[in-house]
Image (cartoon, coloured by chain):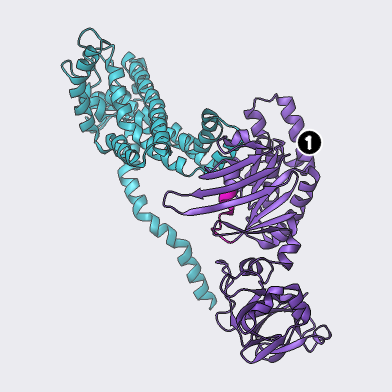
Chain colours: A purple, B cyan
Amino acid sequence: MAEVVLENICKTYGNNFHAIDQLNLSVEDGEFLILVGPSGCGKSTALRMIAGLEDVTSGSLRIGGIDVVDMPPKDRDIAMVFQSYALYPHMTVFENIAFSMRLAGKPKAERKKRVDEIAKTLQLTSLLDSKPANLSGGQRQRVAMGRAMVREPAAFLMDEPLSNLDAKLRVQMRAEITSLQKQLGVTTIYVTHDQIEAMTMGDRVAVLKGGVLQQVDTPKRLYESPVNAFVAGFIGSPSMNLFEATLKGDELISGAFAIRLQDAAFVRRPGLRSYAGRKVVFGIRPEHLYDSSLESGRKYQTIPAKVTSIEELGSEHIVHLNIDAVRVDSGDPDAVQDFGLASNAVAKFEPISTVHAGSEIRLAVDDTKLHFFDPETHLAI
Amino acid sequence: MTRQKRSHHKLKRAVAPYLYLSPSLLIIGLLMLLPMATVIAYSFQNSAVLRRDPSFAGLKHYQAIFDDPVFWASLWHTLYFTCMSVVFHMTIGMVFALMLNSDRINPRLRNVLRVLYILPWLFTAVIIAVIWRLLLEPNGVVNSILMQIGIIGSKVEWFSSPQTALHAVTFANIWAGYPLFMVSLLAGLQGIPKDFYEAADIDGAKAYQKLIFITIPQLMPIIISISLLDFIWTMQVFPLIWITTGGGPIYSTEVLSTYTYKLAFSSYNLSQASASAVVILLISLGLTLFYIRYQKAR
């Protein structure tokens, strides 16, 4: 087990493309850190640099206090789980797990003992003689984990290991990996583009965009206090609604509606006062918008909205709405504008809500949950 | 749809595949199966082709070729020629494919080498035979170079000496045939996921271990398929040997194809030639069945 420290890490490709720019990150001993971001943000490149599969252009990288920048992957004392699992199809599960021990020339009896232990932990004992082709996605994933565990590394590196699984299995494997990591206590760096994985699995989450670290924090803090509009939009599902408005006195004015802000909003964000009379970006998560006709929404102020479509999920309704405000792009390249221009806001309503597509409603807004960002820099106010 | 219409549609669907197959089946039947059956029939006849009413000879012609020491020499030469060719085709093809697939070689140089290495494949057997006859003649380039660097003291008659002729003709065939392996293995190498090597790098595999534990097992289906096909094709090679040595000197490069040809068109013993051809057919058939079974097993 070891601490992994990245200092001013840069990765520039031949065409002067900066994949990673000045990345500073410190992963504590035994910590589960998630690297998350949209496609092409450099998260996999960062992981591959830690593994030694990509050269570091500049900066320092230490694993367990040792500078590993010029070390080959095998000497870094790490193990990696690949997105494709990289299981050798011609080898059995046993041979796949024991591969690194075989390369190291470990005796057969020792290999068997260690693989048996791991197979027991991962519930793979009955599959040791099977080939990867005969395993299910989840079993293959477990074999890949076993292959990483057999080395007893200082750190685990995982590159989107659940992305090839179906949604149900992903939920199950998420829990399995998390509990296994807690059980083993090995420092783990886990790359994903799925913010649900990021929020549910890691001790801390590092959000990357365009090769630049945006924020590294606990999932709760990322959700509650995003440092900029990108993190605000990226973390949470569905994404936070971001709109432009003008701050006049203690009111946010946008088109035909106004939201009155309480004093507490200005106390929490002293900088907000300086935006008086100016444009500001405000954000509200879908779960903080309510159907005003229901009990849960009665205590909040309301704004007019038109329902464009509803996704009934059983436990909740995802309601796509149109409100009289200009939507702000969070900068997430993977974000999809819902239903073209028909809707510009998303809300999560209770399943007892009776709103229907096409209806004009009063949308209740929990103004204590509003987020504010500078319209130019998109930094949190 | 009425019942009549439905049964008509069913019949059309059942017959259609056979209609598509029929032209090729007809051609194969006329140009392959019929001649094959005729040759098998000839091998059991006395004075086949030469007489209008040949008598039944039983296994006489088979007995005759099995008693002929030249047949056994031909069989041995065929096996040597074929085995050496296949082994070296595969070895050279693998080495070149690994080189062409390596990131360490400059991409431009790689493209040049790719063209250079594939050149032998572009030549027909006749041109290859002529090239190697010129290169290996007593006053040719090969002798000159080998004498210059001191490997041989005097000029060697590579194709005319019973000691060297079989090796020389095998060497020419190896040179002509490795590109098939090279191209096939290169395609296979490019299909091996990069992750396998990266995972092995992290696990501490050395270059030779990656070759043994990943590359070769991953290429095994290609290696077996191409080796079997090469074995079948090389066993039947005729023009290269016929043009370079004609099976000589003193039968030292006689292979089953030249032996059969000579029986048929030098001695005009078509019955015995047919028996010899049937022996070649049976060996090839055995290998083909093995190949088909392997393909099915995959």
Q: Which residues are magenta?
A: A38-46
Q: Position of residue A50 (x, y in %)?
A: 60, 44
Up/down of B293 relative to A360, above or below: above
Q: Residue at x 77, y 81 (%)?
A: A263
- Asked if residue B29 shows in the view, the reply is yes
Up/down of A153 relative to B251, above or below: below
Q: Is residue B284 magenta?
A: no
> Where is residue A250, by image quadrant?
bottom right
Disc 1 crowd, CA 10 A, few/some/many (<14, 14-19, 20+): some
Q: Secondary structure at mark 1?
A: helix
Q: Is residue A44 magenta?
A: yes
The residue tagged 1 is A117
Q: Position of residue B99 (x, y in %)?
A: 40, 34
User: Among all residues in the image, which is located at the extreme right?
Assistant: A295
> Where is residue B140, by image quadrant?
top left
Q: Nearer the viewer, residue A7 or B287?
A: A7
- Asked if residue A354 shows in the view, the reply is no
Q: Amino acid at mark 1?
A: Glu
Q: Position of residue B293 (x, y in %)?
A: 51, 38
Q: For mark 1, name the chain.
A: A
Look at the image and tell me in which quarter the C terminus of chain A lies. bottom right
Q: Position of residue B212 (x, y in %)?
A: 54, 30
Look at the image and tell me in which quarter the N terminus of chain A lies. top right
Q: Residue at x 62, y 50 (%)?
A: A24
Q: Nearer the viewer, residue A379 or A220?
A: A379
